[in-house]
Amino acid sequence: MGLAGPLSRFIAALRLQSTVIGAIMLRELHTRFGRHNLGYVWLFIEPMILAFCIAGLHKISGHGMPGGVDPLAFYIVGYTPYYLFRSILNRAAGALQANAPLFYHRQVSFIDVLMARNLLDAGAVLFALIIMLAGNGVVTGEWPDDPVWMAIGVMLIALFCHGVSLLIAAATAWGAEAVERVVHPLTYLMIPLTGAFIAVWWFPPAVQELALFNPTIHMFEIIREGQFGVAVQHHYSLGYVLASVAIANVMGLIAMRAARRHIALQ
């Protein structure tokens, strides 16, 4: 009985924040896409167009992939999660300033805004990935080996990037205006390092050990295992991934707490 009071208050607070985050997501949808011709559909079409263009170019080039994997599927499951990585990080710097009027409402926090934006991007990318892989399966007969495991890999990328986005937003609040200009080119320069377009097993053991210090490489290996199964080798540590996600988010929360007094709402 003693736990009933705190538990009911926690559930009520959770419901309130869920409602707040849902409302922010709807506002974000309208702000980004409500006035475009395609409207909200563009949220899903954009990553699909970019992923299909890149995957299609590699498919029609006629170059084979190591292990005989389907190049179209390989680049779909590589670029689409990378689009999520890039989208979350690139939008982080301006997220708080763009939503400044919302913070005059007591129920809305800085974390709510970033969480709503990142959930929206993650949901859109996951939906786009499902549609593209379903289409690829119908055409080629190559279906994902474990779609649930692949979705877990995508959500791990989203969670990791959420933590990094908190750090970026905090750095911007501290007055590092150059952060936004630096993050955009860095996300493109990091393409070879994220593991989106490379598989760990392609490299000799010494290079593999060095590459696996990067947590995003583990996440892309999880996604590729969900697509190709045991047809190709996969190298990752789920414990290392979870620890990286936890560290990124804890550091992000600490940074946001330290920076909150520096966030200008004008």
Image (cartoon, grey):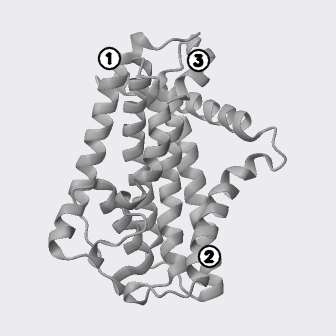
Residue 152 coordinates in the image, percent (x, y): 41, 60
- Of circles 1 and 2, the one toward us is 2
Q: Amino acid at mark 3?
A: Ala
At 60% from the left and 88% from the top, the residue drawn is 140
User: CB atoms at circles 1 and 2 under 8 Å apart?
Assistant: no
Q: Say which of 174 and 241 sits in front.
A: 174
Q: Amino acid at mark 1?
A: Ala
Q: Which mark is residue 56?
A: 2
At 78% from the left and 39% from the top, the residue drawn is 34
**112 w.r.t. 214: above or below:** above
- Of circles 2 and 3, the one toward us is 2
Secondary structure under tag 1 reads helix
Q: Say which of 175 and 44 sits in front.
A: 175
Secondary structure under tag 3 reads helix
Q: CA distance from mark 3 to mark 1?
A: 18 Å
* Residue on which the image places disc 1: 258
Q: CA distance from mark 2 to mark 3?
A: 41 Å
Point out the residue furthest to the right here. 37
Q: Quadrant of residue 22?
A: top right
Q: Which mark is residue 100?
A: 3
Residue 39 coordinates in the image, percent (x, y): 79, 46
Say which quadrant the N terminus sits in. Answer: top left
Report the side of 265 relative to 234 (left or right): right
Residues packed near mark 2 inside 10 Å, few (<14), some (14 to 19) or many (20 plus): some
Q: Going from the N terminus, do you reach mark 3 or mark 1 first?
A: 3
Secondary structure under tag 2 reads helix
Q: Going from the N terminus, do you reach mark 1 or mark 2 first?
A: 2
Say which quadrant the C terminus sits in. Answer: top right
Q: Amino acid at mark 2?
A: Gly
